[in-house]
Image (tube, helix red, strand yellow):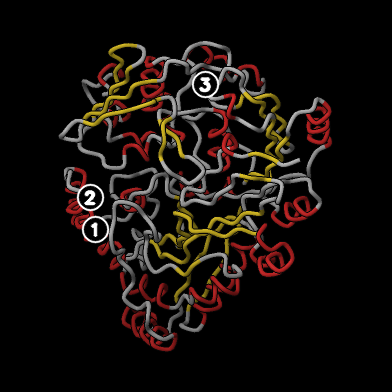
Amino acid sequence: MLDVTRRHAPLAFAAILAATRAAAQGRIVFHRGNDGDPETLDPHKTSTVAEAHLLRDLREGLVIHNMMGEVVPGVAESWTMSPDGKSWRFKLRGNAKWSNGDPVRASDFVYSFRRIVNPETGAKYANLLFPIRNAQAIHKAAAGSSLETLGVTAPDESTLEIALEQPTPYLLELLTHQSALPVHPPSVAKAAQEPERPENWITNGPYMLRELAPNSHIRLDRNPHFHAAADVKIDTVIFYPASDLAAAVRRFQAGELHLTTDIPADQFKSLKEKLGDQVRIGPYLATYFLIINSAKPPFDDERVRRALSLQIDREFIADRIWGGTMLPAYGVIPPHIGNYGERAELDFRHASVLEREDEAKRLLASAGFGSIPLQVEFRFNTTDNNRHTAEAIAEQWRAIGVETRFVQTDFRTHFAYLRDGGDFDVARYGWIGDYSDPQNFLFLFESDNAGFNIGKYSNPQFDALMKLATEELDIARRAAILREADSIVIRDEPWIPVLHYSTKNLVSLKLTGFEQNLRGAIPTRFLSLKA
């Protein structure tokens, strides 16, 4: 999942009124910060972490993540897999309902899966569902393909069957993603026409949309039709866009927020001293990259890419720039990933800073930049942490004769520019795992992945290994194949891994049930608030 950040206006008076009204009614109100405002609440058109937090409360898929980040039943109460791993059958619970009282039916999921792979929907994450039979052909409008041929069927309204192109060990993890969430077929058109009207969003999760105030707040109220409504302890949850991390800290300390989704790196140590166990840091399936445009000279030269990577002091950046809230990254895949073993890492991890610098200078000289400086344009989306990181890297590169020019833009401009194929030398990027499997990081480098292979990396051997892995049912053998593909990416280094993220939260002493997990999933339904 793409990592994006943005800035927002201060908390509006309307949010205060919303909270006051709810509290006056004797309702338990949970105030939580969010990474930013959603661009959409349509699960088939979303792509950001901020949207994922909201959608976990608004909708329920076949399976969900609990507070430990484990896959547990959602709308499906049970499931079975065929011996060849190519077909799954899900039994839907009989008491699942939409927020208007309609029953949640297997045909709703058939409609929803067809909708996201339909190219007319314009779904950013349709490719995540390509393991489903005919999904890729339908999305790419291949000859002879039609929505009816998608491998998702409903023998009856309480049974859903999913047929796959090949065994997919991470299917259940994949089905927790927002791309696999259902929509209410009769209300889709109305929500698209008037998305600003909360009543148009018919949802099936523990909460339903009550107020939508861009740049201010989003209020959700408990859904009385939810099958487990009696177990939901919090009546109202109000999400506030909190990309201004320093402002979020002040609101937390003032008691205006019970939870934040991030912590300013430069305040981490002082906050830990002041707030103690209210500061939570944990591992996260995410990596902070510099994408190199490997289709463009001189960055198509492996020597140039390796020299740039060698000269980055990751330990300094993790400790001094990010205050110890990030880990130095020497591999594409973050620690603790599922269905894997030893991760591939850069071979110079244990070399000294001086040894790395000497090799970097030799490589640049051999590539023709001995007396002529290498000119690098470095693009990034503007945040304090990103700017400080870029400045530190540019200063480190200066020591090997690299001259860096910055291009700073807001998140929307930055990622739209990259997505639309804009020219660049080096660009900041972040990837947060959509499911706990190495394929979700390695697929970024497949040559035919036009949506995410932004640096236009192409290696036929790598592509062949990724295809071979999709056909392998044995988990251990599949892991070995992916490990070989992983080592190729590390050798070619089309993207430079810089840091592995951590989950970073401020958690009120009033909030109970909170647990950090690798997926960064914080479903409100599993939380409660003390008076």
Residue 313 vs 33, above or below: the answer is below
In which quadrant of the rendered view does residue 118 lie?
top left
Characterize the local packing of mark 1: few (<14), some (14-19) or many (20 or more) Cα atoms within 10 angstroms: many
Q: For the point 42% across and 15% down, which residue is it?
A: 94
| Circles 1, 2 touching at the beta carbon (< 8 Å) | yes
Comes first in the chain, label 3 or label 2:
3
**Which mark is drawn over residue 35?**
none
Comes first in the chain, label 1 or label 3:
3
Type of amino acid at the residue the image marks with label 3: His
Type of amino acid at the residue the image marks with label 1: Ala
Tell me how far mark 3 sits from mark 2, CA to CA. 40 Å
Residue pointed to by mark 2: 466
Q: For the point 67% across and 67% down, which residue is it?
A: 266
| Residue 466 on image: x %, y % | 22, 50
The foreground one among 328 and 192 is 328
Residue 106 vs 48, above or below: the answer is above
Comes first in the chain, label 1 or label 2:
2
Type of amino acid at the residue the image marks with label 2: Met
| Residue 380 on image: x %, y % | 55, 58
* Closer to the eye: label 3 or 2: 3
**Which mark is drawn over residue 227?**
3
Residue 406 vs 315, above or below: the answer is above
| Residue 366 on image: x %, y % | 31, 82
Residue pointed to by mark 1: 485
Characterize the local packing of mark 2: few (<14), some (14-19) or many (20 or more) Cα atoms within 10 angstroms: many
Tell me how far mark 1 sits from mark 2, CA to CA. 7 Å
Q: In the image, 321: left or right of 372?
A: right
Q: For the point 61% across and 64% down, which residue is it?
A: 387
| Circles 3, 2 touching at the beta carbon (< 8 Å) | no
In which quadrant of the rendered view does residue 129 lie?
top left
